[in-house]
């Protein structure tokens, strides 16, 4: 069976339906790099997650106090008084069910050791493929 050009165009134009059980899951995205923070936040919103973003650990802690995320996506190397692991540990003390995805351009054995201390954690190295990012979020949301 052949597919016409108009069929392909229509399929491309049709939005992908998010799984009903994932729609509205709360995601807090913390990254001090505006390009990553803005792009990933937009993508997650498009995927129908309820997203808040923060550029620092302090802002993230304030947001989490009211927003109470299901998923934390945090850059390990924040240029801040707290690194991403410390942010995750602090938020987990308020929400033990929190799932965490660490993102960083500097994967080290130190990070891997620290990450083991955070339950329900995943790791993505920058730059990462969009499909890998979305799969990690879906896994955390399920």
Image: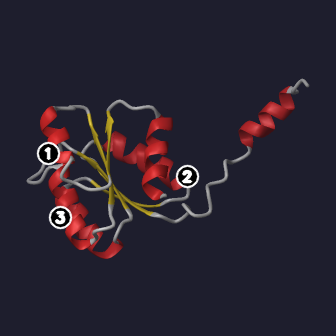
Foreground tag (3 vs 2)? 3
Residue 131, above or below 115: above
For the residues bearing labels 1 and 3, Cβ distance under 8 angstroms: no
> Crowdedness of circle 3 by 10 Å Cα count: few (<14), some, many (20+)?
some
> Given contact means CB atoms under 8 Å apart, are the residues at marks 1 and 2 in contact?
no
The image quadrant where one finds the N terminus is: top right
Q: Nearer the viewer, residue 129 or 1?
A: 1
- Identity of the residue furthest to the top in this view: 2
Q: Earlier in the sequence, mark 3 or mark 2?
A: 2
Residue at which label 2 appears: 46
| Left or right position of 100 against 83 | right
Q: Which of 9 and 99 is in front in this view?
A: 99
The image position of residue 95, as x and y in percent, is 28, 71
38 or 115, nearer to the observer: 115
N-terminal label among 1 and 2: 2
Give the secondary structure at mark 3: helix
Q: Residue at x 12, y 50 (%)?
A: 80
Residue 70 on image: x %, y %: 39, 64
Please tell me whether residue 75 is drawn above or below residue 86 in the rendered image.
above
Of the pair 64 and 132, the residue shown nearer to us: 132
Q: Is mark 1 on a helix, strand or loop?
A: loop
Residue matched to label 3: 90
**What's the CA distance linking mark 1 and mark 3?**
17 Å
The CA distance from mark 3 to mark 2 is 28 Å
Q: Classify mark 1: residues with Cα within 10 Å, few (<14), some (14-19) or many (20+).
A: some
Q: Which residue sits furthest left?
A: 81
Q: What element carries label 2?
A: helix
Question: Which residue occupies 52% across, 65% down?
Answer: 24
Left or right, residue 38 beside residue 9: left
- x 55%, y 52%: residue: 46
Give the labeled residue for mark 1. 79
């Amino acid at each position: 069976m052949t597919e016409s050009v108009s069929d392909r165009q229509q399929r491309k134009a049709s939005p992908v339906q998010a799984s009903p059980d994932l729609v509205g899951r709360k995601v807090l995205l913390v990254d001090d790099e505006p390009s990553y923070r803005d792009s990933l936040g937009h993508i997650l919103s498009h995927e129908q997650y309820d997203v808040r973003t923060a550029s620092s650990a302090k802002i993230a802690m304030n947001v989490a106090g009211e927003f109470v995320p299901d998923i934390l996506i945090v850059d390990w190397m924040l240029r801040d008084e707290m690194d991403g692991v410390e942010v995750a540990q602090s938020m987990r003390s308020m929400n033990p069910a929190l799932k965490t995805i660490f993102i960083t351009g500097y994967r080290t054995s130190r990070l891997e050791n620290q990450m083991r201390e955070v339950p329900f954690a995943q790791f993505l190295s920058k730059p990462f493929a969009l499909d890998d990012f979305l799969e990690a979020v879906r896994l955390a949301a399920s």
